[in-house]
Amino acid sequence: MNASFQSVRKWAVQTARLCCGVPDYDVYVKHLREHHPEREVPSYEVFFRERQEARYKGGGGRCC
Amino acid sequence: MQAAVMPKPSPASKILWVAIAIVGAFCLGVVALRRGEPINAIWLVAAAIAIFVIGYRFYGKFVEHSVLQLDPSRAPPSVLRNDGLDYVPTDKWVVFGHHFAAIAGAGPLVGPVLAAQMGYLPGTLWILFGVVFAGAVQDFMILGLSLRRDARSLGHMLREELGPVPGLVAMIGVLVLMMIVLAVLALVVVKALTHSPWGTFTVAATIPIAFLMGGYMRWFRPGRILEVSIIGLVLLLLSIWAGKFVADSATWAPIFDMDAKTLAWWLIGYGFVASVLPVWLLLAPRDYLSTFLKIGTIALLALAIFLAAPTLQMPAVTKFIDGTGPVFAGNLFPFLFITIACGAVSGWHSIIASGTTPKLLANEGQARMVGYGGMLMEAFVAIMALVAAASLHPGVYFAMNAPGAIIGTTVEQAATTISQWGFVVTPDELLRTASDIGEQSILSRAGGAPTLAVGMAQLLHNIIPGEGMVAFWYHYAILFEALFILTTVDAGTRVGRFMIQEIAGLIHKPLQATESWTGNLLATAICVALWGYFLYQGAVDPLGGINTLWPLFGIANQMLAAIALMLATVVVVKLKRERYVWVPGIPALWLIVCTLTAGYEKLVGPISFTAAANKYAAAMQQGQLLAPAKTQAAMQQIVTNNYVDMAMTGLFMALVVAMVIFCLRAVVRGWQANHPTAHEEPYVALASVAG
């Protein structure tokens, strides 16, 4: 029960963030560690700001 | 994991699908055939659900397996180019939520409300069958094509499959369409806020609220989206509550009481400032609010319809299918299919289906759920908007949506005119509705948002009664629509600015630098001027603006859908799957016929822009003034505006015809080739790369 609540919550948070253009931070950190160990891991705050800027850089975006 | 071949259905599933089909057919029969007595909205909703489920299970699956031939064993772009940021294999439900939030906007809420003037049946049938055979097919196929092409954009795919010139032509179409979309959406806000101090105050309050949220997230609690959104939501609800006192106050009300022209200028100024400010300050925080509020409100609307189960007061079919309707002019064919764009088939989606979504899907086997399923969800939103409009008293509906030039400007005139059409309504009923929602007048508030807001307010009031709550819900609904329209205007102006800077960079290189203030301000000014012109035109339009500009928007949006479906047709042929060419080909053909016919009728004939221009020009020659113009200069302005609209219509038609020629050429070549000529990326097995 607790586990399923946790997974629903994680899903909701991840979806809500993605709708605002912020991908999953943990996934990004994992990706950096696995594939680019030489790069510095940004803090969530730095990551968030970079993504916020990137979202409105152009491209399709949203619908009418 | 799913197998690539269709599994044999079990007897139990056969029985289940037959049962769904029977229930759906029965409900649809009730909706379509019962005349003379009002039916309950639940019949319509049930028919819609049954058709969507069947369409998803059978037609969607057919498109997946036979036409696109998607293969779950193939590595998608998210795996091949995984960078942890843009390309990330993501849970399918997360992708679905994201995709739906990106495609759902004001469109599916406005079009069906306008189309309700023909009765609820024509709109319902077009949404149900349009989405299954055209809209969802378009979204799904473009997503499928993009998945096989490194998640490339629509423009990129057009250049690759058709050549550089067709790609450029289509992109010009997209830029022009975007300007029309921004203008028409901004006009919806203007119509909703005209002489409404309550509404104007609450919408204006979103700006300081967003600043506050932006600052909070910048310096105090960076990246806490949920927390700041809850704070923002509470402040928004407070501003709705405070709006009532503003509207009642003798000092404050006049400040927020504006006419359409003033509001248009404010929005133009706002659009300029908002899109040069840093995103974290205004755009991003409001984007969060509007995204969450949008999903929440759609859920609330669904709940209200299920719980309140309203009766549809609008007849199934009204006499206005003959083209004499007051909300928009033109016959059922082709104008119904132009008016309801988003919800049945929307060209915009092809941009989103070839944007972020294909970079996130972890598996080709999930594309049907996201692409086809996401569009069915949007169609469901359109059905709910139609239900909300059709459950209003038809007299109130026409009073709200017909222009002042037709129904007059007093409740007595309006009630008389509308009653003569056969929708008996008294001036008292119109006054009472206005006072229930806390407004001075409900007359001629076209644009969908106010009508939907009244419908929603009455539905919500039925399930959560309370003194004065109708007015609260009304302003809540107005605020929610205005909020996400303003976000679209802001983000759209930014995208337009980048496009213009890119084009300007071809002439003078330094203008391309997005960090340069000269380039930035110049391109933003051009972009705002482009949509601002059409917005202002709408604000001074004799028929209230929506009546004139919505068809232009519909033609443009369906033009883009036709282009996307034509691309899909070309690719199907180039893949040597000619026997399935009709799957994207017939909807493409249908949209081409609709856009060209509607365009032609808007160019020549009684309902055309030309006729409107000539009428005003003839009056000018005789020195007369026609309402709403009060000077000869205003008359000249109306004539010019109509000529501009004519030119735009001509441009869209020329674009469609040019694309048809390019596509036919590509289809013939693809057909003659004896091997597949489409530009798919080579097959890479998922198992070989997935770690």
Image (cartoon, rainbow, N blue to C red):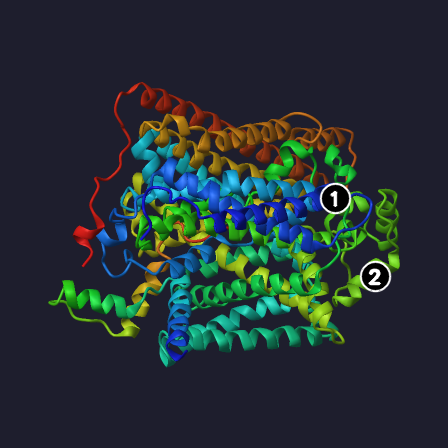
Q: Which residue is mark 1?
A: B316
Chain ID for label 1? B
Residue B605 can be seen in this image: yes
Q: Residue at x 61, y 69 (%)?
A: B202
Which image quarter holds the C terminus of chain B? Answer: bottom left
Label 1 sits on a secondary structure element that is loop
Pinpoint the chain carrying mark 2. Answer: B
Q: Quadrant of residue B119?
A: top right
Q: Find numbered disc 2 in the image and state the secondary structure of the residue it sits on.
A: helix
Q: Would residue B672 appear left or right of B49 to someone viewing this image?
A: left
Q: Can you tell which mark lies on residue B431? A: 2
Marks 1 and 2, Cα distance to the nearest angstrom? 26 Å
Q: Camera-side residue: B433 or A1?
A: A1
**In the rendered view, does B649 fall on the left or right side of A11?**
right
Precedes in sequence: disc 1 or disc 2: 1
Within 10 Å of disc 1 (Cα), the crowding (few <14, some 14-19, many 20+) is: many
**Badge 2: few (under 14), some or many (20 or more) residues near its Cα, within 10 Å?**
some
> What's the residue type where badge 1 is placed?
Ala
> Is residue B222 positioned above or below B94 on the image?
below
Q: Residue at x 47, y 50 (%)?
A: B373
Q: Where residue B540 sits: x, y (%)?
A: 67, 46
